[in-house]
Image: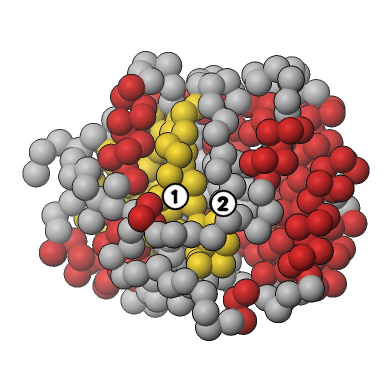
């Protein structure tokens, strides 16, 4: 095996239901010069056995084990034990299009040496692979820190590809969030740290299937809210240029995000509670017509007519529906004429 240029890092805790499909989506990448480092974070199911079997099939797959310490510590261990020039985190239940890594490597190579993070678009899927929604078609590039504070257009851990030196300089993932009982925004936090120092590029294609599960960390809305507060407090302390107005807009948009999480979990009252905490009014007014259409329809996850992601996922070629809430268009108007720092 040639020396890997990309290190795929997977933190897995009791992921036996999904870990094989997740690993295989990394193994199928058209970019072959990669390693896949899976950290079993103290699982009590068959996660480690499944990964061990995959490593016998493909020498690029490697299993590490540790007592349960949380997703940030597990990812940091995988990063420390890997060697690639680029680092690609992958959540243990998500899936990649086969061209995801190749397209992102090409984008970062073309923007070298300045750019340090490449993101793409994604689709939300449920536990059986039905497409619930797709991401906005974000086109935000360059020095994007203020805008990334306002809205996390990198989506999830499985979306970005990082240049290793920039990720390490940023300090990797923060395990203190879990220690303080406010885990959940580790991915956004590390993207902010990298974006504070380097330009960002986008690959304008849907290349990630992000699995939405009621029992996942991102569904614990109160904990996620505390996590965002901790991340933004730390950001404001180390980056005085982030204005209170940007932080207020970030707070309002994140409340809208949690309203959406609650809606998909079937918690209508929770969705209303989070929506009432959102703002500013201009953003809320732009989103309200789209939310109203959702509320008068039967939840899409309850139907059998939803598109399913095929086993050999090729998201880039699927005819995906329009986003339920077109945040890309809303924010394009919202940011018009503002400094894109």
Q: Is residue 139 above or below residue 66?
A: above
Q: Position of residue 83 (x, y in %)?
A: 26, 36
Q: What residue does disc 2 label?
A: 135
Instruction: Tell me whether the residue at label 2 lies in contact with that at label 1, contact meaning CB atoms closer than 8 angstroms.
Output: yes
Q: Position of residue 47 (x, y in %)?
A: 35, 71
Q: Quadrant of residue 247?
A: top right
On the question of residue 241 being in view, the answer is yes
Viewer-proximal residue among 196 and 72: 196
Is 245 left, or right, of 225 in this rendering?
A: right
Q: Quadrant of residue 31?
A: top left
Residue at x 70%, y 21% (from the top left corner): 239
Q: What residue does disc 1 label?
A: 206
Is 73 left, or right, of 295 in this rendering?
A: left
Viewer-proximal residue among 340 and 22: 340
Viewer-proximal residue among 27 and 288: 288
Viewer-proximal residue among 203 and 200: 203
Tell me the quarter of the image containing the C terminus.
Answer: top right
Residue at x 52%, y 79% (from the top left corner): 305
Q: How many other residues sit within 10 Å of disc 2, few (<14), some (14-19) or many (≥20)?
A: many
């Amino acid at each position: 095996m040639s020396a890997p240029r990309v290190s795929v890092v997977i933190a897995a805790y009791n992921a036996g239901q999904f870990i094989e499909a997740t690993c295989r989506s990394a193994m199928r990448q058209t970019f072959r010069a990669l390693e896949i480092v899976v950290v079993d974070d103290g699982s009590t199911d068959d996660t480690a056995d499944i990964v061990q079997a995959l490593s016998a099939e493909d020498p690029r797959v490697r299993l590490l084990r540790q007592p349960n310490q949380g997703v940030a510590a597990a990812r940091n261990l995988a990063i420390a034990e890997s060697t690639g020039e680029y680092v690609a985190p992958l959540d243990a239940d998500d899936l990649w299009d086969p061209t995801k890594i190749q397209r992102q490597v090409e984008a970062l190579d073309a923007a070298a040496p300045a750019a340090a993070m490449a993101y793409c678009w994604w689709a939300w899927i449920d536990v059986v692979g039905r497409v619930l929604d797709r991401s906005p078609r974000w086109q935000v590039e360059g020095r994007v820190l203020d805008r990334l504070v306002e809205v996390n257009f990198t989506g999830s851990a499985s979306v970005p590809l990082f240049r290793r030196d920039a990720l390490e300089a940023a300090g990797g993932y923060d395990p203190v969030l879990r220690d303080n009982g406010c885990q959940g925004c580790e991915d956004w936090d590390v993207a902010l740290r990298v974006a504070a120092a380097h330009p960002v590029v986008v690959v304008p294609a849907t290349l990630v299937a992000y699995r939405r599960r009621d029992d996942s960390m991102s569904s614990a809305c109160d904990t996620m809210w505390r996590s965002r507060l901790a991340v933004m407090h730390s950001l404001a302390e180390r980056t005085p240029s982030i204005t209170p107005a940007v932080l207020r807009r970030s707070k309002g948009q994140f409340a809208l995000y949690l309203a959406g999480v609650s809606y998909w979990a079937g918690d209508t009252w929770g969705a209303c509670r989070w929506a009432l905490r959102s703002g500013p009014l201009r953003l809320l007014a732009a989103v309200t017509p789209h939310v109203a259409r959702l509320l008068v329809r039967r939840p899409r996850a309850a139907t059998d007519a939803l598109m399913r992601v095929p086993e050999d996922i090729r998201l880039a070629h699927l005819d995906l529906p329009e986003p339920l809430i077109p945040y890309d268009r809303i924010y394009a108007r919202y940011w018009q004429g503002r400094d894109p720092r």
